[in-house]
Structures are given as structure tokens and as C-alpha cells.
Image: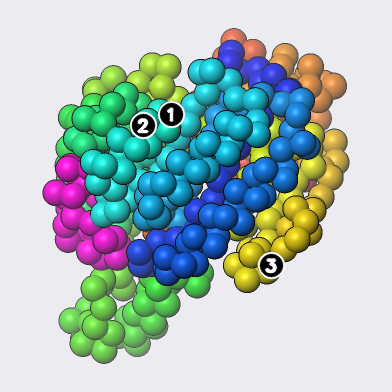
Amino acid sequence: MRDGVYKMKDISIYIHIPFCIQKCAYCDFLSFPGTEEMQEQYVQKLLWEIRESAPAYREYEVQSVFIGGGTPTSIPAEQIVQVTETLRKCYRIAADAEWSIECNPGTADAAKLSAYRKAGINRISIGCQSVHDRELKRLGRIHSREQFLDCYHSAREAGFENINVDLMSGLPEQQVPDWEDNLRTVAELMPEHISAYSLIIEEGTPFYGRYHRQLELREKGLEPDEILQRIPVNMQDAGLLPSEDAEREMYHRTAEILAEYGYRQYELSNYAKPGRECRHNMVYWQRGDYAGFGLGAASCVNDVRWKNETDLKRYLACGQTADLQTEREELTAEEQRSEAMFLGLRLTEGVDSAAFARRYGQAPEYYYGQTIDRMRAEGLLEKTEGRLHLSVRGRDLANLVMAEFVE
Ligand code: SF4
């Protein structure tokens, strides 16, 4: 973060690797298993896209690169190195740029990790989700607690001094003490950053189908055991997801426990040691420019937003980078302001009124005066040292508050 002000000629790059060993039960990301041949073909096309797109970004300096997915660590390390080399060759990249890679513990060994470090990747984001094997199994994760711990220590040994660990709360049958144990186990490892999201049952995922079939049976009056006999799955969601109160308690305990270990909550779901906030994600929340390469990758540059082709066959067959772009739209002034509000309010520091006025013409109060007054009167928004931010109660109702700013 640069004092809350994002320089306009900076850019961040997102690279999408869509391959995963198997689909997790809750996942609605653009990801799927792929053969070696498919992976090789995909990476070659991705390198082509990165090279062909470079002239459009001549005036930009890359401040962060995020290699995500999918599971980037599931493809050969040499292919990731090809991506980093191509980026370095074709783009101007800041000497202190943040280079992150997402890692699934079941897929990254010491050799891969040290190849990433050698390629200049300086931040690793480990998708742990839980340190309880029972919970991992339910989520359909491919790794165990032991594999996560091995991966974490191997990353340190490979020289990673900036590690994020992802955790997920609100899992079926999870109790507040289970969640606290997850947090403490990870915090004791002292990663520089922890992301703690709650499980969302997204439409189209295996969880969603099971959850709704089980709820139907529950509504018909069947007991959990009977439901399980009918739908023998490795989760017992019907009525067994934590209550809203338990979820809220988990959320509040997250900030309290992580504060004990020296983490500061800087975004609704993100916690960092001082100075270790994720620079790449800050760009999204502060509406900086970003270019996405790869299947389905999103870009927003100069307030023009688009999304890459999501069909693998069509992506591979595409002959011109412009033809990859779908859903291209130029954001209106109203949309830009509205995004600045609902994204900025995700940050603990909130929206800096003066910086907002410099960028969008007037302070937030000018455009959203009535809404802001009402939210402040309801104790959901506060203003501190010129910054509008969510109150503690506002964080609990963040979705409702943000919806008020959507144009
Ligand atoms: S590893 Fe990540 S991207 Fe892949 S299926 Fe699981 S949650 Fe989705």
C-alpha cells in the first residue's frame, strides 16, 4: 500500500492457471483437472498472450504479479518459470515488485518451491483452509494437516520470507473452539499474512447440491442419520452448518486471536503483520489498474473492464488477443465512484475523503450524503481522521452497507 494513493501508471498482473488435481466440494472458480498435454498447450498459449499483449502496457510499470488459479503449483515448475521469464522479458517490472504464487500443499515439493524462489517469486499463498483432517476431507481438499505443515516449512527452507496462509471458517459441524484451534495453529507458525474467509455455499458446487437435497429431507422431518443414509456423502450439511451467531463469533474471535499474535486486520477477511499487506489485492480494493492473462482472467485498465474467454477450446484457438476479450465495458463516472466506495469500505482504513475527491471530483459526502448520514446514524459507518470506514457492527453487516453504494 502506498499511503492509500495508487499511482496511475502502475499496473498489476494476474496470471490464471486453471488446472487442479480434483475439484474441491465448495469451489466455483474456473478450474478443472488437465492432462500434461493440455497443460503444455495452455502454457504455450498463455505465453503467447503475455507476449502479444505487452505493447499495450509499454507505459506501465508492473508493481505486482499474482499467479493464481486453479492450482499453479500443480503444473511443472519449468512452466511457471517460463511465465516469469516471459513477463520479465516483455514488461517493465519494478525492482521491488511483489511476485505471488498460489500453492496447494498436496502439489508443491521442495524442488518446486526452490525453483519458484530462484525465478524471483517472493511471496507464496498456501491454501490450507483447515488444519483438521476431518474438515479437510469434508471440503474435498487433496492434502492433510501434515502435508500443509511440510509445505509451510519447505517454503521457509526454500527462502520464502513472505507467506500467506488461507483458512476457511463456517464449515459443516465446525464449532467455535475448532476454528480457534485452526487460527492458533497457523498463527503460531508466524506466516506474514493470514486470509480467513467463511465458507459460502455457491450454486453449482457439489456442496450446493448436497446441501439443498439434505435440507429438503430435513424439511420432510428426517433425522440427520436418516438423511445420511439417503445421501451418503462425506459431509452432513443439513442443519449442521454453524448458526449465524456462531459464524459471527468465529469472525470476531478471528480478529481478537490474530491480534494476540501481532496481526492487524486490514480488510474484512485479511490480516497481516505490519507492512505485509498483500500489495496485489490492495490494487483491487483501491481500484488500481490490473491486467489478467489466461483463461477467464479479468482486467481493468483506465476504467475499462473485460474478462478473458472462459472456454478452454476457444481460448486455445484464439488468433488475436483482442478476440479473447469478453464482457468489455467502459465504467461510467458513477460506476467508478460506486466501486471506490464499496471496495474501499472493505478496508479497515476505509475511504480517504480527500483522496476520493482528488480522483472523483468531490468527497463521498457530496455524492452519497444521505446514505452516509443514515449509515452513520445507524452506527454502521464512522469517520476517523478524514476516512470513512465501517464500524465493528458495520463489518458484521458489510454486505448490506456495501449494497447501499452500488449504483
Ligand atoms: S484447489 Fe482451489 S481452485 Fe482448485 S478446486 Fe480447490 S478451491 Fe478450487
Q: Which percent across, then down, holds residue 354?
A: 72, 14
Identify the residue position indicated by label 3 in the image.
317
Query: At label 1, which amino acid type do we have?
Result: Gly
* Foreground of the two, 263 or 107: 107
Identify the residue position indicated by label 2 in the image.
117
Estimate the spatial distance between the alpha carbons at disc 1 and disc 2, rounded to whole Å.
5 Å
Q: Residues within 10 Å of mark 3 (few under 14, many from 20)?
A: few
Q: Residue 342 vs residue 205: left or right?
A: right
Mark 2 residue CB less than 8 A from any atom of ligand 1: no
* Foreground of the two, 7 or 206: 7
Which part of the image, by quadrant, shows the C terminus? top right
Q: Residue 366 vs residue 291: left or right?
A: right
Query: At label 2, which amino acid type do we have?
Result: Arg
Q: Are marks 3 and 2 in contact (CB under 8 Å)?
A: no
Give me the residue at 37% from left, 30% from top. 118
Q: Is residue 138 magenta?
A: yes
